[in-house]
Amino acid sequence: MPQRPLTTESPFPPTVFRSRTRTPMPTSSAQAAAGQQTDMSVLATLTPESLAACLTRELRDATPDDAAIPPRDEAVAIFRRHLGRYQADIRKRFESYELKGAAAAKTLASFADVMLRAIVDLAVRATTPSEPLAMGARAGFAVAATGGYGRGLLAPFSDIDLLFLIAQGAGERAHPVVEYVLYFLWDLGVKVGHATRTIDECIAEAAKDTTVRTALLDARLLDGDTALFAMFEARYILSCVEAGAAGFIHDKRRERLERHRRFGDSPYLVEPNIKEGRGGLRDLQTLYWMCRNTFGTRHVSDLLAPEFIWMGLLTEQEAARARRSWDFLWTVRLHLHYVAGRAEERLTFDMQPVIGARMGYTRHGRQNGVERFMRHYFLTAREVMRLTHVLEPAVLRQAQGPVANAAKPDEAMREAGFTLLDGQILPDRGVSFDQDPIKMMQILDWARLRRRPLHPLARHQLIRWERRATTLRDNPEAARIFLDLLCGDTTEEERPRRRGAALPPPSAEENSPVYSAAYGSHPPSGHSYWLHILNETGIFGRLIPDWARIVGRCSLIRTTCSPWMSTR
C-alpha cells in the first residue's frame, strides 16, 4: 500500500487545461433565464447524468487559468459535497418508500460509477500532463468494478472493490494513476478493496483462489482501455471454461457449508445474519455465481431477471418469489446500515423492533409489529433455502453431467416407483408427484426405512409440488407415514413386516467424507431430520394448516423448534 505524503503541498503538476473552454454568456435576457432554468433543473433533479454535469462544471470553475486541475483541497471538497448530497438524497427516497432495497443499492452504485470516472479522469490529467485529453493516456490501463459493486449493487457502508488492470510493461505509467485514485478515495472516507494486476496475474490468482475467481466473474469496466478489458474478459471466460464448472461449484458448496457453520446453520436464529447466515443474501449470490460460471457470464447477467426463466430452470412463480426475497433482504440490509451507521449485517434484538417499525410492520391482532417482521424474515429465509434446492440440482446436472449409480435399487423399491442415483433416492421415470401426491409421502418413508438421503432432484420435486399435499389430509396411508416419520419405530423386526424386505446395512460410501462433501447431505438419522424435511419442503404446513400459521413465529420458534434444531 503506498504511503501518504508527509507534506501538505498539492501533488498535482503545474500544467494547464489548454483545451478547456468556458461556457459562453447568454446574449439576451431570455437566453439568460433559460440558462438559469436549466441549471436549476439540474440541481433539482439528482441523477447520475446531472451529477456528472455538476462535477465537470465545478471542477472547471475551480481550476485556475494557469493550472491543469483544481487545487487538491478544493477538488476533495467538491467531491465530498456531492458524495454526501447523493447519499443523503438516496437515503431520503429509500426511507420515504420511493425506492426499494435492491433499487436503492443499484442507484448508489450508479452514482459511485460517476464519481469514480471523474476521479480517474482527474488522476489521468494530473499524472500525464503532456497529453491530458488523449486516449493514449489511458492505453494499457483500465479500472473495473468487482464483487458486489461489479454486479451494480452497493450498500451504504460497503467497501468499493476495484481492479486496476494494467497491460504488460505499462506498470510504470499506470501506478501513479492508481496511487492518485486510492489517495483521493481515502481522503473522501471511502473504504476501498483493490488489486492491481495484469491479465496473466488475474488468471493465475483466480486458478489458485476461488474467492478471486468469484470476484472476477462480476468484473465491470468503469474507465480506461476498452480493448484491454475486452481481452481480459475473453481470456478469463476461456480459463473458466477450461477449468470446468464442477470444481468451482464444489468449492462454493464447501465454502457455503463452512459459512453456515460459522454464522448459523439454521435460518431460524433469533439474531440472524442477513448476509452470511443460512437463507441470507450470500446464499442467493452463491446460486447466481454457480449459474454464471456454468452457463456463461453473457447468458446469466442477472439471476432474477424475468428473461432468466427462459432457460427453464425456474418457473415464473418461483422466479417471482425469488425476486421478492432478494428485494426484501436488501431492504432489511439497507435499513440496518442506516440505523447502525456502519456496515452492520446482524439483525440483533435491539435492531429488530427498529427495523420492523421503519418497514411499516405494526400490531395486527395478537401479533405485534416486530413478530410480524421477524416472521416475514424467517419465511423469506426459508424461501431462499427452497430456491437453493430447486435451482442447484439443475446447475449440478449441467456442470457434472450424468453420474453413475453407486447402488442399485431392489425390486421392491422399483415396484414402488423409486430408484437410486449415486446412493440417493429419487422418483423413477414416469412417477409424478403432481399426478400421484401420495408418492411424496412414500418416498420419505422409503428414504427413512432404507437410510438413504433424498436426491436433490427429489427434494426439488417435493418443493415444487408441495401444494398437492393438501389432498392427503384425509388419506390413511399419508397419516400413517407422517406419524412414522416423526415418532415411528424402525427396528429390524418391524422393517421386514412393513416392507417385505430386510434393510441392508449402511454402506461405507454413505458415511465417507467424499459423499458428504459432494452432495452436502448425510444419510438420514433421527426423527428431527424428517421434521426438518417436512417443514422445509412445505409439506408439513399443507398437511396441518395450524402448523403453517406458526412457521416463522419468533415467539414460538424458541420453545417449539429449538430442541430439534439444536440436534441438527
Image (cartoon, grey):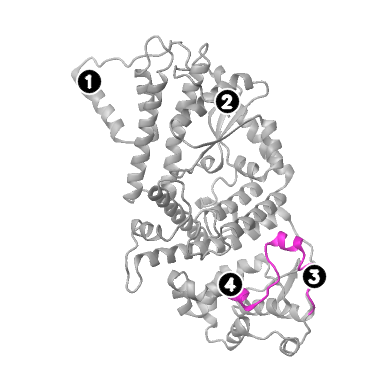
**Mark 1 and mark 3: Cα distance apart in space:** 84 Å
In the depicted structure, whether residue 7 falls above or below residue 530: above
* Residue at the spot 48% in from the left edge and 77% down from the top edge: 547
In magenta stretch: residue 399:
no
* Location of residue 363 in the rendering, given as x and y in whole percent from the top left corner: 32, 68
Does residue 184 appear to the left or right of 85 in the view shown?
right
State which tag comes first along the sequence, 4 or 3: 3
Q: Secondary structure at mark 4?
A: helix
Amino acid of disc 2: Asp
Q: Which mark is residue 32?
A: 1
Q: Secondary structure at mark 2?
A: loop
Q: Which residue is mark 4?
A: 532
Task: Give the alpha-carbon distance from disc 2 to disc 1, as whole Å.
Answer: 39 Å
Q: Which residues are magenta?
A: 504-533
Which residue in the protein does label 3 denote?
A: 407
> Of helix, strand and loop, which one carries label 1?
helix
Mark 2–mark 4 distance (CA, rounded to whole Å): 53 Å
Count of marks overlaid on the render: 4
- State which mark lies toward you, 4 or 3: 4
Where on the picture, by quarter, is residue 215? top right
| Foreground disc of the pair 1, 3 | 3
Task: Compute the Cα span from label 2 to label 3.
Answer: 55 Å
Tell me the amino acid under the disc marked 3. Ala
Say if 321 sits above or below 552 in the image: above
Whichever of callouts 2 and 4 sits on the residue coming sooner in the sequence is: 2
Disc 1, disc 4: CB below 8 Å? no
Q: Is residue 277 visible to the viewer in this orientation of the structure?
A: yes
Towards the viewer: 528 or 482: 528
Report the disc number at residue 225: 2
